[in-house]
Amino acid sequence: QFLTMLETKIYMGRLLAFYTQSAADTMRGIYGMTQTIFNMPCAFITPITISIIPAITGHLTLKNHADARETEESAVRVMALISMPCAFGLATLAEPVTALLGGYKGEDLALATSLMAVLGISILFNAIVLVSTAIMQAHGHVNRPVVNMFLGGLVKLAAVYLLSGNPAIGIVGTPIGTLLCYVTIAVLNILSIRKLVDNPPNIPKNLLRSFLAASVMGIFTFFTLTGLRLLGITSRVILCGAPIAVGVVVYVVCVVLFKVLTREDC
């Protein structure tokens, strides 16, 4: 909460250097709406992190390091199954989603689209941070994630200060700072796990299949949206709903074809 308050003070102060108070408040409101959408997928990851800590701890207590690693990698795959399509979907469909949910148009819609696209990508790295932090906590390394988050927070504040003060970037620098923050923490967490954990899980490898499935889904949703626009369809419900429906079907098929999950994961 303190970081969020400090971030808000920074970007509002920087925006007021070249925008009126009313314009800056409008941008802040649009950013708040996109943040609400960003937070929702991550709420589905939290139950995974809560449940794996006692499971991993139980295996470690019994000296079953192989089973602990299997649980950790399974959690990563389930996390990726949820977060990947959310990240690719919101990045690809940022405009129709914000147009439908926020009712924006014109310059406000363009701003909401830019904000949502960056925050959409951030969902994946936020999910990685949540799961990797839980893994380190289960192994008894409770201080390292805090240090990593502190460093990521410094990166975020620095990025927000530098980018939001650029009139060509403006408030879009704030979600960019969020993305850089989570990328920094995710990388530091993965490196910390490799260094501190015996028989560490291979997090990048277990993200790959979901990444491929979500990539294919993203391509289909993008071309579906483009096709609808070429047909002259302007309904916000259709422009948002039809690509999502296509994406869901494509993603489910790809999950099966690419064998994203194992029987044990299910």
Image (cartoon, grey):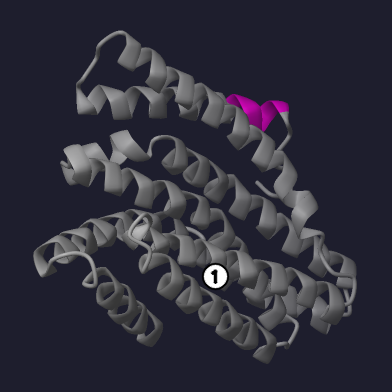
Residue 226 % position (x, y)? 40, 19
- Give the residue drawn at x 90%, y 70%: 199
Location of residue 143 (image quadrant): bottom right
Pick the residue in front: 24 or 214. 24
The verdict on residue 157 being magenta is no
Disc 1: which residue: 181
Residue at the far top: name it.
Answer: 231
146 vs 140, left or right, is left
Please tell me whether mark 1 sits on a helix, a strand or a loop: helix
Image quadrant where one finds the N terminus: bottom left
Location of residue 170 (image quadrant): bottom left
Location of residue 29 (image quadrant): bottom left
Residue 19 % position (x, y)? 19, 64
Residue at the far bottom: name it.
Answer: 143
Pick the residue in front: 175 or 219. 175
Disc 1 residue type (three-letter):
Cys
- Give the residue drawn at x 61%, y 28%: 216
Residue 11 can be seen, yes or no: yes
- Using a 10 Å C-alpha cutoff, classify the residue at mark 1 as few (fewer than 14 neighbours), some (14 to 19) or many (20 or more): many
Residue 166 % position (x, y)? 38, 63
Q: Is the magenta stretch mostly helix, strand or loop?
A: helix
Residue 52 % position (x, y)? 64, 69
Q: Which portion, as a residue range, is magenta? A: 253-257
> In this figure, what is the number of numbered marks?
1
